[in-house]
Amino acid sequence: MGLFIAQILTGLANAGALFMVASGLSLIFGVTRVVNFAHGSFYMLGAYVGYSLMQVLPGMVGFWGAILLAGIIVGLIGVIVEICVLRPVYSAPELFQLVATFGVILVIQDLVLMIWGPQDLLGPRAPGLKGVIRIMGEPVPQYDIALIVITPFVAFALWYLITKTRVGTLVRAATQDREMVSALGVNQAWLFTGVFFLGCALAGLGGALQLPKGGADLLMDFTILGSVFVVVVIGGMGSLPGAYLAAVIISVLNVFGVTYAPQSTLVLMFVVMVVVLMFRPFGLLGKEEVAGEHGQVGEPERPIKPAGNRIRLLVAAGLVILGLLPLYSGNFAVVLVTDILIFCLFAASLHFMLGQGGLVSFGHAAFFGGGAYAAALFVTYADTPMELALVLAPICAGLAAIIIGWVCLRSTGVYFAMLTLAFGQLLWSLAFQWGDVTGGDDGLVNIWPSDWASDNSVYYYIAFFLCTGGILLLRQAAHAPFGYAMRAARDSARQAEAMGINTKRVQLVAFTFAGIMAGLAGGLFVFSKGSIFPNELETARSFDALIVVFLGGVKTLSGGWVGAAFFEGIKDYLTRFEYWRLALGLSIIIVVILGPEGIVGSLRKAGERFGLLKVPEDAK
Amino acid sequence: MNRNTFLKGMVGAIALSVTGLSVAAQSGEPIKVGEINHYKRMAAFAEPYKKGIELGLEEINAAGGVLDRPLEFIFRDDQGDPGEAIKIAEELMTSEGAVMLTGTILSNVGLAISAVAAEKQWVYLASEPLADALTWSQGNSWTFRLRTSTYMQAAMLAEQAAKTDAMKYATIAPNYAYGKDAVAAFKEVLTKLKPGVEFVGEQWPALFKIDAGAEVQALERSKPDAIYNVTFGPDLAKFVREGTTRGLFDGRSVYGLLSGEPEYLEPLADEAPEGWVVTGYPWYDFTEEDGANKTFVDAYQARFNETPKLGSLVGYMTAATVAAAIQKAGSTEGDAIRMAFEGLDVTTPVGEITFREIDNQATMGAFVGKTMLKDGAGVMTDWTYLDGADYLPSDEEVAKLRPAE
């Protein structure tokens, strides 16, 4: 009994920092609709800033003062980020801002490394709270008790701010319908900035508060991100009590998981999320998303048209140049372009379902890595030749997509995205944990192409034909009646249904088709590398694809592969330098600010302005 | 802020960050070695390692280089991503003119490079990855490993554990291949040395995501006589703090794999645990009697004005190994270097090491000692250097572990 209570207390204490970071993310999303990937970075900043302040400020007052100050300082950094990076891109298509926040992550990572150095910092202990209290004989650290007491106070203060003050009224109004709020004369820009301050300050506070239980290290931004997203979604986006409840549930379950099923900790919270979303598609305390937007943000989307002659010539010329690559360039260029082509197909497959179908997936790597693992497993256990494995990879990925899609498509919007994330994570942990079959994180090695294809140039041609073929096929599908049905389902499910389109089925087919293409890319990947590891199934891989899709331009047909080629190319160049993350992050931010419609969208605009491209009649 | 000014500022910042690159300026035709590592993702471990290499190179080149040519390392960051590392390996070997590859800390990246090295017939010296698979189940004739493997270090601790009366053990290890290998090896060797031991609890926190309070409660629940710890980095810090606060370590002996390495012990400062039996690197204790060890530590501190880590030593030994191999090969041809590695003897700060012909594993050993607090910092005391050659399975067993060549 004593142990049981002590375990619950441990869970409650762990919930503290998690709740603060999650509530900040939830607030920011609710009001600004920005999915702030950089939220973990603000948490990390809070820990580092708090640590430095605690070195200077002495005693008990200094300790708590440092935590408070860390929150405020991180909030101010958040304000700078919001004004410089996000304000210019609020009018961009929905979710585009997450690319900008991705750039912010990279910048903050390198800046923190520059300022604080690579060493892990052990957080100072709280003065006066270093010991334990015995509860029924079980030791409970005093600082845990402090956290358990503080968290509800913060939660209450937030609740009061949101429900009882004028600022809170505005925030709630903006959460429901931000355009109406600005129409009523509220300065929306400052409201957004204010909310961003509050959200980031909460993240910073969380980072500083956990110092006595851990410390500050350079990996903590990503380690918390997954759990924070899960908490926000289980609680319901935008719901503060929900975030608290979810943080407590996740933390307490985790403590019991550690004791009674020690290997389960990798996936436990994702399983909980899937179960919750199956029964409550909008989280525990979330409300159904009302269509807050009056039409889409930004310019109306143009109808899809086949490319003009000039563009076709350009693409044909590009293909010829690529096709002759092995004849005039060195071996490494061939290898590099093979990599880029494979990534382009992967990105194009996500772009297809995201751009045409409006299905934002956070777990697309499940099919890329899934295809790669399928091919690798066939080769390892059945000595399948490469040719057959390259056929089986997309088929297996497609089968997985049918099952995963069937479950995920019960939800929509962010909840759909989080379900795909959960399945991606489940597949990852399967590959990671099932060491006897998948080799665990030691992966599967020695998966090489057949003899005739083992030369880099020959393999390049295989990748070249399959990838460009796949990308053209995806493009063709967008022009086919099926593409029209997808766009109808995306733009207005109700009207599409009224016209006799089974939107769910259309979406499932789109999801599967995208999965098949990603699986093909995965199959090509594994033979080009000769090995496969679980990191190809990681959420980071899904986010890579997501970033380049937005970077290339969601509302264009070629955004996926253009963004991928640009991103891979620039990354290959920049990683040669010491502070490449800073440079890459800043490059992304610049691209985002200069071209809020993505690379392709902006190029098209520029082309039209300078008379290189014809402006379509309906866009004049 | 005006958008244009802001953008200009950012372009400037990019330019600034790019010029951090250093260019080696040496006369003659240098021999290039491709070094791939996770310089950003694992900065705390990779940076001292890089400095160790740099110090080694300076000494080698000051003494006339290798084959009368300067030795040069090309450092490249792979972001801890195996696919990326393979691409970089290809570039280094085919367009940068590297003669062989070194590097990586993460075992999976090491395994990825090792597979591609065997396929393309490149020599790869796996300097820091610890996975047993690298020289055994996935071993190949082109891959050589410098550092003391997981099995060897676990066997050293198991030997110490077997000397005590403790019969009930609990283990805690990060939930990935390294952690699993480390626990399996410890169990295997300890059970062999002391058949009656019992393993009463196993904890598997996710790497760098430890829920330390819960782990400590779970360990306490299994009431072990002794604990075997494999966590490291930020996980170790959290585990030690919660464990100390909750009294987990009171009256129990604890065995910590790698826990004594300065990389992990230093951040703990005055909270470093006392009385743990650990493998590590007691550079602060070296005296004139320790000869080359002392010389290296002094040279390192003089050169970089900071204390060495274990990574520094491994980096320094990497440079020495590469130089010795190429010198012995008398050529920069891949096959010649590979042949030279078989049975290669290298003189290093920790003594003479040999690359075993049977499994391409070097016989580098480890320092084993007890932790204690001294002047507010954790140090190792009563340490000895154990030769790695004594902690490997018999040749017959190794031959069975390794695929036929």
Image (cartoon, coloured by chain):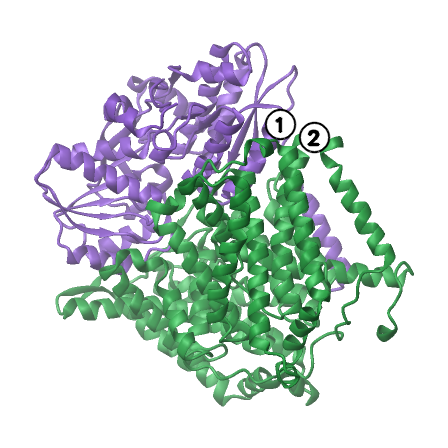
Residue A68 showing in the rendered view: no
Looking at the rendered structure, the kind of residue marked 2 is: Gly
- Could you say where residue B2 lies in the image, as x and y percent from the top left? 76, 64
Q: In this figure, what is the number of numbered marks? A: 2
Dot 2: few (<14), some (14–19), or many (≥20) neighbours within 10 Å? Answer: some
Q: Which residue is mark 2?
A: A330
Q: Is residue A378 above or below residue B384?
A: below
Q: Which mark is residue B94?
A: 1
For the residue labelled by badge 1, is the local secondary structure a helix, a strand or a loop?
helix
Q: Is residue B366 above or below residue A51?
A: above
- Quarter containing the N terminus of chain B: bottom right
Q: Are marks 1 and 2 in contact (CB under 8 Å)?
A: yes
Q: Chain of mark 2?
A: A
Name which quarter of the figure residue A243 lies in: bottom left
Q: Color of chain A here?
A: green
Q: Chain of mark 1?
A: B
A176 and A77: which is toward the camera: A176
